[in-house]
Amino acid sequence: MKTNTMEVLLIASASDAGDEEALRCLLEARPEAPAEAVRYQLSRVPTIVEAVTYMEAEAVDVMLLDLAGHDAAEIVARMEQDLLPLGVPILLLAEEKDEAAAHYAITRGAQDYLVKNALNRPWLHSALRMAVDRHEVRAQLHTYADLLAVSEARFRTIIEQNADGILIVDQSGEICFTNQAAQKLLKRSKQALEGADWGASLVAGSAAELDITRPDGSQIVVEMRTADIVWEGEPASLATLRDVTERNAVQEALEETATALQHSNKELRMFANAASHDLRQPLRTTSMYLELLSRRYSDAINEEATEWIASAENGIQRMWQLIDALLQYTRLDVENLTLKQVDASTVLERTLTYLKADIEETDAEVTSNELPTVRADAAQLEQVFQNLIGNALKFRSEVAPRIHVSAEREYQDWIFSCRDNGIGIEEAYQDRIFNMFERLHPRDAYPGTGIGLAVCKKIITRHDGRIWVKSEPGKGATFFFSLSAV
């Protein structure tokens, strides 16, 4: 409809000219009508055929079809065939004697009818506006219905093709719909399921596990999740079914494995302590007899024998250190990892306190940037710092050691680095140095057990991180390791 103007097309024969003039008078705006009031523009054609032709060229908001002088059945048939497809609302003009025909026409698609001798201005204006409004509402309803049908078709396609079993259950508990996955899961046909009582409680937003026995006698555990929906215009429940039989079996196996691992760790801890004691006892005995031999027979022992005894005592000391190192490495597997927010700067300060004597002895300088807070085990992070800085002090060059510790953010991790100016490491050995007992230099040149970097790797691996080194011989080394950010 044009702004404030309604185009009305009267379909009436020339013999009804008096009706046309009466309509024009009723539709004519009064002088006192407000400027925003609807204005009516009336046009007339004598036949339905001419109306169709007219509307091909002109826009029309509503049609007035005069029933006078026409066979009711014939004109209604023509209305259905020619006028309704045009998508314009139709009002009928009828004599009192034609009211039955008018009622029939309404059942076939007309909006309403008006009795000629009862027409007045308010009634006519109201009827025209309501006809247009009803037509627009019906058009919108048809559009919404089409969209709803498309949406329901898509919904059906989605649930039909879903990998999970899906049931639609009405409020009485009767199954209205099943997809192929549900039929396969339950091993029952569509005909057997739909119309049957589901039996299980359906609570929107809930999840439950059901023990189901299928027709062939096999039993499964099904996880069911429920949601409220509207199905074919009625409230219903959508139940999603997933076979969790294997998942639950795996979960039970994992729990059993975890329990067994706890017992194994406990036994391993007891074994490590016992083995440490049993290995130390022969060393204590050997060391004691060497000491007795040195004291009681010092006058009878020559210089070569004295060197042999000293060499044996050094071997015992190294074996003692090796046992301690092995025990420390073994305990990493059985000790609980206490992960919490740890200030890495505080951990580094504590480490430097322990290494103070070595730092002063080598005239070393250890600096650092402000280090972040990370999720870690504080005691084990301290071991990492102690081993890396201790190695930097040990494998120093001819100049005083200069060691710098820093960290940079990389996605969800912090990448720590410990850089020194020591002797460096050849590229061929940069992976091997993290293995147990891997030594690149003679024991008399650089003392130690060869286990420190292996300990570092195990600690960082337990923190779901990684550790690596970049170095060139004679240009120092930089060790990197990653920890999760808080």
Image (cartoon, helix red, strand yellow):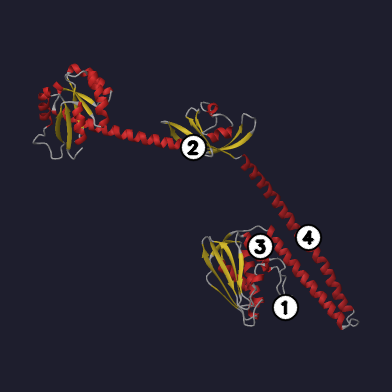
Q: Percent from the top left, x then y, of residue 210?
A: 58, 35
Q: CA distance from mark 4 to mark 3?
A: 23 Å
Q: Quadrant of residue 216?
A: top right
Q: Residue tagged by mark 3?
A: 458
Q: Against 351, is 108 above or below?
A: above
Q: Nearer the viewer, residue 154 or 14?
A: 14
The x and y percentages for residue 212 are 60, 33
Q: Residue at x 10, y 27 (%)?
A: 21
- Inspect the image, locate mark 4, and give the three-letter code of the amino acid beneath it: Ala
Dot 1 alpha-carbon crowd within 10 angstroms: few under 14, some 14 to 19, many 20 or more: few
Residue 329: where, in percent of width, then height? 70, 63
Q: Which residue is label 1 attached to? A: 445
Quadrant for the N terminus, please. Answer: top left
Calculate the distance from the C-alpha at mark 1 to the C-alpha at mark 4: 33 Å
Give whichever of discs 1 and 4 has the lower sequence position: 4
Which is nearer the eye, 84 or 142? Answer: 84
Counting residues from the start of the chain, the first of labels 3 and 2 encountered is 2
Task: Confirm whether residue 256 shows in the render.
Answer: yes
Please, what secondary structure does the residue beneath circle 4 have? helix
The percent coordinates of residue 391 (x first, y second) are: 65, 73
Q: Which sits earlier in the primary sequence, circle 1 or circle 2?
A: 2
Q: CA distance from mark 3 to mark 2?
A: 48 Å
Query: What residue did someone put label 2 on?
Result: 159
Marks 3 and 1, how far apart at CA:
26 Å
Q: Is residue 295 above or below residue 482?
A: below
Mark 3 secondary-structure assignment? helix
- Place residue 46 in its image quadrant: top left
Which amino acid type is marked by label 3? Lys
Which residue bears the numbered disc 4?
274
Q: Are marks 4 and 3 in contact (CB under 8 Å)?
A: no
For the residues bearing labels 3 and 2, Cβ distance under 8 angstroms: no
